[in-house]
Amino acid sequence: MRQKRQKQPKSARPRIYLLDELRGFAILCMVVHHAFLDVGDVLQLFWGYRVFDALCTVQPIFWGLFILISGICSRLSRNPIRRGAVVLGCGLVITGVTVWVLPLMGITGAKIYFGILSCLGCCMILTGLLLPVMKKISPRLGMLVCGLLFFLTYGISEPKHTMVFGLVHLPAALFRTNWLMPLGFFNSSFRSADYFALIPWFFLFLLGAFAGTYVRDGRLPAPFYRRHSRVLCWLGRNSLWVYMGHQVVLYAVFFLIAILMYT
């Protein structure tokens, strides 16, 4: 009697721990950055504001790293559209809490419209929709074009509303309303405590998505697959929930410190 041949299970793709660690490092930098703001808000120690403002100069670096890695991981995801919908939903929750709940608690100036989660969620959904087209494009060409577009459009949301390193001035009509705020165009009435426009950040995300082709195919050096820090790995793998809950934890800790300091 012939025995049926058992199917061999497909080998699972090895975990790329270095990506987790880099993402964990970026989210840790964000938590520390926000902690200094809370030092000023809760403890009324104004040096916290000064440190927070100083760190704003390097904020685009660790957030850029986070967005780039998120783009890479979008090529490793089974369903980037579904993942993007979850992240976008979390971003909308953050907006709802900061716009309607916090003011009822007496906390003002913390409203968030189209923050990092909303931006990342949209980037994931758009990338999932564009994947059939992206697969027909050379990853190197895609990385080059997206990298150029990122640098050429960086700064369109700044007061001067320029691109191509300040050489091209955008039409004033783009900035007369806030309806195009997700793209990076808004008027002087717009305020957001955390804001990441699709232009230019979507181009950086796409750069990572094209780079993810090589990552998915296992073309990385051996150190990428070794764990170097359990803490950073944990932060990276749970970055969504760390972001969702970090301010609650920070506020609770600093309120307890304030009680001890001022009573």
Image (cartoon, rainbow, N blue to C red):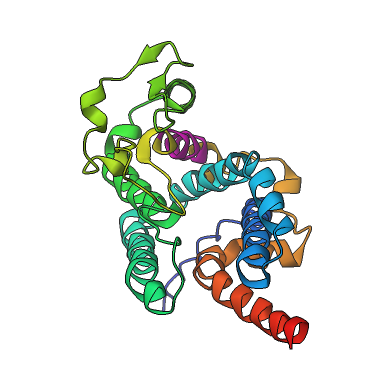
Task: Answer left or right for 230 relative to 245.
Answer: right
Q: Residue at x 36, y 40 (%)?
A: 198
- Residue 248 occupies which quadrant of the picture? bottom right
Is residue 133 rendered magenta in the image?
Answer: no
Dominant secondary-structure state across the stretch colored magenta? helix
x, y (%) of residue 200? 42, 33
Q: Residue at x 64, y 52 (%)?
A: 26
- Residue 65 occupies which quadrant of the picture? top right
Q: Nearer the viewer, residue 106 or 24?
A: 106
Q: Nearer the viewer, residue 87 or 249?
A: 249
Q: Residue at x 29, y 37 (%)?
A: 187
Task: Answer left or right for 159 relative to 68.
Answer: left
Query: How many circles with numbers are drawn on the protein?
Result: 0
x, y (%) of residue 186? 30, 38
x, y (%) of residue 130? 29, 39
Quarter of the image for the N terminus: give it. bottom left
Vertical placement of residue 137 versus 68, above or below: above
x, y (%) of residue 90? 38, 66
- Residue 173 occupies which quadrant of the picture? top left
Vertical placement of residue 143 versus 237, above or below: above
Quarter of the image for the C terminus: give it. bottom right
Instruction: Return the residue found at the far front.
Output: 263
Instruction: Return the residue found at the far bottom.
Output: 263
Query: Which segment is the magenta one?
Result: 203-212
Q: Nearer the viewer, residue 121 or 229?
A: 121
Is residue 209 rendered magenta in the image?
Answer: yes
Instruction: Return the residue found at the far top.
Output: 167
Vertical placement of residue 180 versus 46, above or below: above
Task: Answer left or right for 168 relative to 19.
Answer: left
Q: Nearer the viewer, residue 188 or 76?
A: 188
